[in-house]
């Protein structure tokens, strides 16, 4: 294929700025050039009224995001507004209760120009997807009438099996400032594994090779139509860390020809920051939940239509000093008035009912949800089910400390899944538990520990998967009979074999029942009667760690956390005169919601302690490439017994480090310089002391007593919170001073 693409200027200094700071600035348009700004979001997930916490400051909500976007559009002469998938799905109840029509309505009101499909657009199936995009009666219960999207959605890698053609248009051409810009859409190829099998029935997803061929094909078609500026909206993961951009979107960039006419690939799905160049393609992603937006600046030759310069800025949508958009506030209030139950408390908690470590172990919130599922009424006059199983990926938030509303419960279980009662043999139950331990395509472990009710078991992680589960019993200690039939409640996602729980598709009987959220809500109301909602880890699951794995630095799933959503009332504009509008908020020099990776923290600690000159060689962990910039530092830290890793010979260098993980490493570094303390006494000052993992409790207590670590917020340590750059800097200064004393 002969491309006609000309070279693109992307200054080295600007590239470095884009990778490290999340922003790159290129000079204003030269004569004969048109300056265009592409403003975009990804992974909104219908979080219209959700305030997220970023760098300990409130950010997000649709009214706040709207103000930022409107100010940016007013600032620039030529703009286009886009979203890159997962605008709906796993939504806040203000949207999900109306089948996400409020989110589509908000995007229409904001006059988005183009959108792409994410994996969550497939959650409810193809019929519901088409109704949301094109308008029509939603197939679920036949209650919600969708008006449809006023802007074009694009996707090139989902093929409708009945026609052999793309499910929707593969691309769209927009014209702004006298130049043409095309958008090609893609969605992650992992979608079939991420949604219920029913969600993707009737379509197939292109393979990696087919996808690259499709992008090349449509890029050539677009050039034949005179379009030289081409953007790929790829709802594929990407992250930029320490100046390097990786992920599926980066893999796509590498697979395309170096002289491909693709100028920019917008990423999504993993709710991260991406802003860097790979194989001549600028790759950008702006976190999630409306907590940030990207401003992609293109300098386009007015004669040829080619991009001559490109850069991007990712701006956090902090709420402070920003007036909420009045039209967005009114839209949200309309739906809040329709659902008064969203703001009525159903109980209170002390903040301890969380999903902490649910991917690997029993969690308090997992127990609460599984217990509620067992009580579901299937209209068959049957007794409560023997068991219930809940997949950890379906638990999307924690119960907040203080008042709990229906809205909070809906954020925990936002999918509106149908509960299904299955009949399984005891042997199939054992096989189901074995299917918790899967592997990724690269051979790395992929554990999804089921949250359970009605049974208990032990798992010896030293043994092969087929031999791990033992002492499989009812809660009263009665052994589960492999030949006996039992009833078990799961959600429809699991019942269809989702998350690799394929044995569930072999159940001898299946009965569909109520919606998971309805059951959860009823259980909380009936059980706790508006008072304190309680749940705890009870020993339903007892894991025996693999030998050679000592005290871990990490006790959580290997995923980068998203900003934590917390409910907030919809901001109401005051009747006083509007303050003088400010220009689009200036991005912070370092992305404020960028977290410190485990590798970065160890590297900075080794530097601060002056361990760099100590001789250390050899790879301490299998997932640390010897050529990685942090490899030597990790080897130094391992030799000095500062780190032990995350188990199974891995370190997980790119995962964000938590406060309690940091504490264990710091305690090992300071050794005899820390005071002797009574752990229980020191930690008693924190309301969330019970959330500190056993391996980290003494380290946290010593460091707090020594004044090196401070509370994460007044009265709480926040052990599972990730460490931010500014926090690391001040802590390492204190560590340096302590080590020198």
Image (cartoon, rainbow, N blue to C red):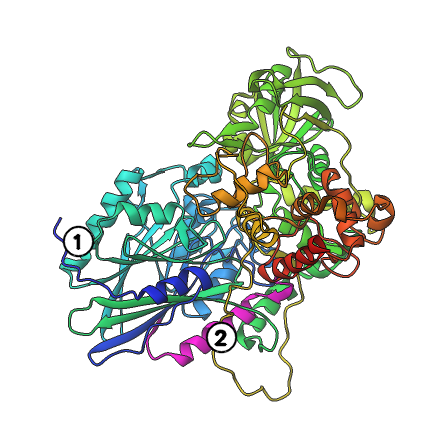
Quadrant of the image occupied by residue 463: top right
Query: Could you give the CA–CA distance between mark 2 and mark 1, rounded to whole angstroms?
Result: 38 Å
- In this orientation, which residue lies closer to the viewer: 271 or 498? 271
- Check disc 1: other Cα within 10 Å, few if <14, some if 14-19, many if 20+: many
Q: Residue at 31%, 39% (x, y): give it.
A: 208
* Lower position in the chain sequence, tag 2 or tag 1: 1
Q: How many marks?
A: 2
Residue 112 drawn at (x, y percent): 40, 67
Q: Secondary structure at mark 1?
A: helix
Q: Secondary structure at mark 2?
A: loop
- On residue 220, the disc is 1
Which segment did they paint magenta? 54-79
- In this orientation, which residue lies closer to the viewer: 630 or 552? 630
Vertical order, 307 against 369 (above or below)? below
Q: Quadrant of the C terminus?
A: bottom right
Residue 317 drawn at (x, y percent): 54, 68
Left or right of 504, for residue 731: right
- In this orientation, which residue lies closer to the viewer: 496 or 500? 500
Residue where numbered disc 2 is placed? 586
Residue 573 drawn at (x, y percent): 62, 78
């Amino acid at each position: 294929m002969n491309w006609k693409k000309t070279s693109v200027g992307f200054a080295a200094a600007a590239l470095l700025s884009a990778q490290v700071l999340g922003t790159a600035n290129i000079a204003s348009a030269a004569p004969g050039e048109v300056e265009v700004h592409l403003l975009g979001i990804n992974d909104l997930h219908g979080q219209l009224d959700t305030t997220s916490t970023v760098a300990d400051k409130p950010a997000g909500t649709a009214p706040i995001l709207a103000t930022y976007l409107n100010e940016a559009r007013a600032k620039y002469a030529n703009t286009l507004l886009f979203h890159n998938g997962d605008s709906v799905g796993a939504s806040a109840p203000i949207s999900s209760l109306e089948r996400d029509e409020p989110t589509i309505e908000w995007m229409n009101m904001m006059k988005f120009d183009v959108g792409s499909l994410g994996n969550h657009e497939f959650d409810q199936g193809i019929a519901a997807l088409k109704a949301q995009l094109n308008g029509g009666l939603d197939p679920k219960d036949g209650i919600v009438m969708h008006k449809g999207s006023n802007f074009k959605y694009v996707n090139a890698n989902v093929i409708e099996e009945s026609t052999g053609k793309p499910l929707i248009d593969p691309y769209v051409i927009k014209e702004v400032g006298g130049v043409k810009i095309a958008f090609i859409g893609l969605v992650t190829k992992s979608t079939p594994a991420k949604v219920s099998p029913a969600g993707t029935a009737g379509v197939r997803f292109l393979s990696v090779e087919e996808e690259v061929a499709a992008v090349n094909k449509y890029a050539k078609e677009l050039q034949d139509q005179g379009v030289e500026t081409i953007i790929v909206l790829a709802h594929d993961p990407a992250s930029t860390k320490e100046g390097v951009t990786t992920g599926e979107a980066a893999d796509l960039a590498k697979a395309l020809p170096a002289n491909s006419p693709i100028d920019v690939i917008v990423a999504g799905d993993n709710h991260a920051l991406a802003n860097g160049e790979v194989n001549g393609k600028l790759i950008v992603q702006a976190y999630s939940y409306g907590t940030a937006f990207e401003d992609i600046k293109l300098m386009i030759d007015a004669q040829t239509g080619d991009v001559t310069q490109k850069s991007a800025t990712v701006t956090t949508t902090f709420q402070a000093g920003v007036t909420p958009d009045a039209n967005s506030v009114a839209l949200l209030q309309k739906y809040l008035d329709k659902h008064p139950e969203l703001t009525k408390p159903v109980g209170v908690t002390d903040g301890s009912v969380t999903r902490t470590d649910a991917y690997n172990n029993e969690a308090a919130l997992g127990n609460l949800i599984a217990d509620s599922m067992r009580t579901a009424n299937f209209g068959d006059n049957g007794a409560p089910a023997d068991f219930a199983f809940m997949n950890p990926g379906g638990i999307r938030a924690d119960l907040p400390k203080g008042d709990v509303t229906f809205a909070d419960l809906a954020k925990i279980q936002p999918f509106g899944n149908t509960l299904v009662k299955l009949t399984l043999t005891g042997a199939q139950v054992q096989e189901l538990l074995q299917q918790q331990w899967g592997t990724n395509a690269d051979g790395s472990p992929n554990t999804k520990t089921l949250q359970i009710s009605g049974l208990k078991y032990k798992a010896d992680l030293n043994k092969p998967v087929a031999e791990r589960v033992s002492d499989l019993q009812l809660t009263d200690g009665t052994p589960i009979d492999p030949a006996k039939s039992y009833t078990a409640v799961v959600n429809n996602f699991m019942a269809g074999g989702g998350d690799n729980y394929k044995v569930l598709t072999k159940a001898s009987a299946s009965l569909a029942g109520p919606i998971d959220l309805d059951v959860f809500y009823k259980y909380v109301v009936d059980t706790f009667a508006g008072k304190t909602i309680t749940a705890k880890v009870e020993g339903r699951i007892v894991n025996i760690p693999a030998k050679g794995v000592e005290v871990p630095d990490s006790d959580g799933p290997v995923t980068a956390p998203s900003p934590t959503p917390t409910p907030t009332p919809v901001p109401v504009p005051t009747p006083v005169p509007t303050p003088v509008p400010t220009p689009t908020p200036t991005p912070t020099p370092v992305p404020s919601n960028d977290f410190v990776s485990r590798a970065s923290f160890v590297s900075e600690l080794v530097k601060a302690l002056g361990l760099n000159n100590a001789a250390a060689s050899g790879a301490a962990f299998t997932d640390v490439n010897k050529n990685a910039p942090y490899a030597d530092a990790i080897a130094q830290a391992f030799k000095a017994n500062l780190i032990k890793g995350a188990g199974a010979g891995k370190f997980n260098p790119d995962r964000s480090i938590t406060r309690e993980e940091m504490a264990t490493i710091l305690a090992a570094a300071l050794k005899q310089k820390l005071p002797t303390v009574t752990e229980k006494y020191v930690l008693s000052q924190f309301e969330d002391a019970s959330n500190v993992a056993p391996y980290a409790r003494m380290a946290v207590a010593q460091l707090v007593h020594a004044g090196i670590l401070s509370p994460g917020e007044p009265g709480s340590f926040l052990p599972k919170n990730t460490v931010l750059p500014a926090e690391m800097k001040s802590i390492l200064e204190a560590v340096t001073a302590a080590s020198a004393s």
